Image (cartoon, helix red, strand yellow):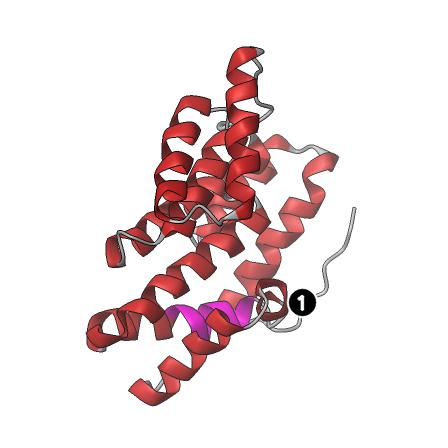
Amino acid sequence: MSMTAEKVIRILRKAAEKDLLNVMSEGYGWYKYSFIPALNYVRCNVKEENELITKSYYFLAGMFYLIGAWKAAIRSNKKALRCNPNFAEAYVDIGSLYYEMGKYKKAIGTIEKGLSMNPDIYWGEDYLEDAKEAIEKNEQSDYDENGVETQVYEYLAQDKPQKALKLVNRKRLSKYRLLKYMALGILYYSNKVYYKRLIFK
């Protein structure tokens, strides 16, 4: 893909300025062949666009959160914070992910850090209260770090559909059929196999 500074900045601004679900509707091809190369190009060649790079990593974290790849979302938010250590929303989002994963003490500390920078992040207070209540009630999270679905989503977020497919095939359970076809779809698209009939068994 031929990259120019003007072209890639336009791609990243599209992601930063539009609604996340709206941009995600562009599909995997746009993510793999436009957004990621644009982000890598700007990160390496257009250093003065630091704010745009920060927002791009934050956008990426939101996308990973929606597909269930929470560890990938945390990593992406941390990359946003390396670009801008005062980006409060990233701290709050990392804290909310810690909450979902059952790491309630880490959630509280991280959310409080974000809210100390920007107390107007409305979802931060809710997660903060929930995390404190979870500790008081000794609640356990449903998050399973080693679960098949969790691992598959993390592999897909890392653009490793072969590993996701191998894991699902090893389980041979019908409940993972959708995950299998997600991995196959990404694998075929990555290899530019644009038409492949999938038999649902």
Q: Is residue 31 magenta?
A: yes
Task: Indicate left or right for 2 with 48 as reference.
Answer: right
The residue nearer to you, when weighing 194 against 27, is: 27
The image shows residue 7 at horizontal and vertical percentages of 38, 87
Task: Indicate left or right for 174 with 24 as reference.
Answer: right
The residue nearer to you, when weighing 123 against 191, is: 123
Task: Indicate left or right for 47 with 57 as reference.
Answer: left
User: Is 53 located above or below residue 201 in the figure?
Assistant: below
The residue nearer to you, when weighing 117 against 62, is: 117
Q: Residue at x 52, y 37 (%)?
A: 125
Q: Residue at x 55, y 44 (%)?
A: 123
Tag 1 residue:
196
The image shows residue 52 at horizontal and vertical percentages of 35, 70
Q: Residue at x 39, y 35 (%)?
A: 112
- Locate residue 42: give its quadrant: bottom left
The image shows residue 62 at horizontal and vertical percentages of 51, 54
Q: Secondary structure at mark 1?
A: loop
Task: Indicate left or right for 173 with 84 as reference.
Answer: right
Query: In terms of secondary structure, what is the magenta stretch mainly?
Result: helix
Residue type of the residue flagged with mark 1 = Lys
Residue bounds of the magenta highlight: 28-36
Q: Residue at x 48, y 37 (%)?
A: 97
User: Is 99 located above or below residue 199 in the figure?
Assistant: above
Q: Is residue 69 magenta?
A: no
